[in-house]
Image (cartoon, grey):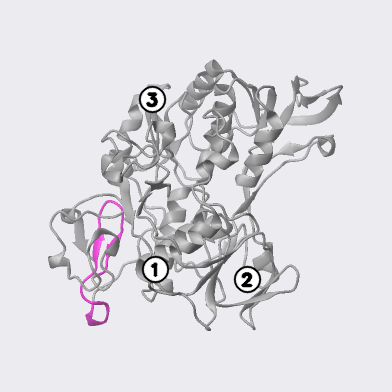
Amino acid sequence: MSAARTTYECTVCGWVYDEAVGDPDAGIPPGTPWEDLPDGWVCPVCDVGKDQFETIPAAEPTKSATSDAPATVIVGSGLAGYTLVREIRKFDAAMPITLITQDGGEVYTKPMLSNALAKGHAAKDLVQKDAAAFAAETNITVRTRARVASIDRAAKAVALEGGETVPYAKLVLALGADARVFPAEGSDAIDIATVNDLDDYRVWRDRIGAHGRVLLIGAGLVGCEFANDLAAKGFTVDVVDPAPWPLARLLPQAIGDALTEGLGALGATFHMGRTVKTYWPDGMEFVAVLDNGTEIPFDHALSAVGLAPRKDLAAAAGLDVKAGILVDRMLCTNDPDIYAIGDCAETEAGPLPFIAPLLAECRALAATLTGTETSLSLPAMAVAVKTPAFPLVVCPPKPGADGAWVVDGDGADAEAVFRAPDGAAVGFALSGTKTKRQPDLVKTMPAVIAAETASGNAADGGDVWTCGPCGWEYHPAQGDPEHGVKPGTPWEDVPGDWQCPICGQGKDAFSKA
């Protein structure tokens, strides 16, 4: 096995800086050491600085994960599956792990799919390493192009298509979600694309070529990102959505209208409050007829209308499902040996199809699987929308929350706060230069899943301390190994300059639980 390299992971979005790869898009050539990165360099996915990265230690080549005992089996090689592996290896270098994936298992960052075109990236350019390299670096077994057909809970084994069975000690479902395509009359004759993984992007990139007219169905977060990406590359883009303005569930109208203007200046045309009634071919092109009679000619169609958690495998095995695979605070299903994370999972806060919750789930579950039971808590988490033509950050209120938006400033340069009837701030949206207010505002927002209250005792190593702004808990028995605080470290011995790993607050922001 070749020597593994030390890499650096963004704690906000999960992107990994590999010194051997660099960041050529930002002018950082391959081979650039971490310490030589300019102070002004930011994560290419979420724009945070170097201070939001943590070291991923090189794997221990002398420790073997080979064992006759059943492995922890992870199904899925997306960001959830591979992040969980990295988190487990921070605690346990030798736990047997088998990862099964129906795709090629390449390591890449999914959020980069929606802004890769304008940067001129082919699918191969997004790959940071192949499955074999990741397996060698993390000391696991990766089975690529293998599809799990069923789960035998009694035998504690998964069956692959073709008949092979793989036993498990613990099973983690990191299945992801399927992109939705809403049908309309004539849609059977139209090849409506979705871009939900690297294989999808490879097909889409080859299909559209260098120019053309794209019908983009959906003006949500991903739809707006693709609209920016396609228009920036010179494509003619028509966006159709029944909502009154883009990202209507995340933004007030003032910012939504300004977003429409910003992307419109780039070349995207929005048809809001409209739906596609029918499609029909017209020679070498296609036409979409909207519900108001508007006809839109196009060469390619792309659907970005949301995700449907992959839950059929779990349901067939008798696991509880609703919108997704139901899990408790420990990310555990109704089977104590089966867990679910990422886009396929449904927590008490519902499905959480964003990167920050996924990373928090992986950190909590890794601790649990390696012997320290850790419940999931999620502070408020802001999302940077990848629309360079219109800088935008959102921290939406919970779906269905009562209240109203209060907007300060022009829509293109605004700070909007969603306030509950009692005046409490429960969400925000920032545009233009006001996006710099994100770090301050997010600390004032309520948690998505509040930390469970706990009290210290001799069994857990001492008093538990809770971060006031975000609710993260410091357990002396667990410590904070990722930031140099060993398990068993009492609160009073935690260094004075230590900071909360979630929100960056100091010790003075903590109180005894």
Marks 2 & 3, CB-CB < 8 Å contact: no
Is 203 left, or right, of 55 in this rendering?
right
- Mark earlier in primary sequence (2, 1): 1
Q: Is residue 288 above or below residue 187?
A: above
**Alpha carbons under labels 2 and 3: distance apart:** 45 Å
Which residue is tagged 3?
Answer: 432
Q: Secondary structure at mark 2?
A: loop
- Residue 464 falls inside the magenta stretch: yes
Which residue is tagged 1?
Answer: 61
Q: Secondary structure at mark 3?
A: helix
Q: Residues within 10 Å of mark 2 (few under 14, many from 20)?
A: some
Q: Is residue 293 above or below residue 330?
A: above
Which percent across, then down, holds residue 92? 38, 72
Which residue is tagged 2?
Answer: 319
Q: Residues within 10 Å of mark 3 (few under 14, many from 20)?
A: some
Q: Quadrant of residue 393?
A: top left
Task: Report how many numbered discs are placed on residues in the image.
Answer: 3
Is 455 left, or right, of 151 in this rendering?
left
Asked if one can make out residue 134 in the rendered structure from this viewpoint, the answer is: yes
Asked if one can make out residue 419 in the rendered structure from this viewpoint, the answer is: no
- Most extreme residue toward the top is 265
**Alpha carbons under labels 3 and 1: distance apart:** 47 Å
For the magenta stretch, what is the residue range? 457-475
Residue under the point 55% across and 29% down:
120
Q: Which amino acid type is marked by label 2?
A: Leu
| Residue in the foreground of this view, choosing between 18 and 508 | 18
Q: Which amino acid type is marked by label 3?
A: Gly
Which percent across, then down, holds residue 182? 73, 41
- Residue 60 falls inside the magenta stretch: no
Which percent across, then down, holds residue 497? 15, 53
Q: Which amino acid type is marked by label 1?
A: Pro
- Mark earlier in primary sequence (2, 3): 2
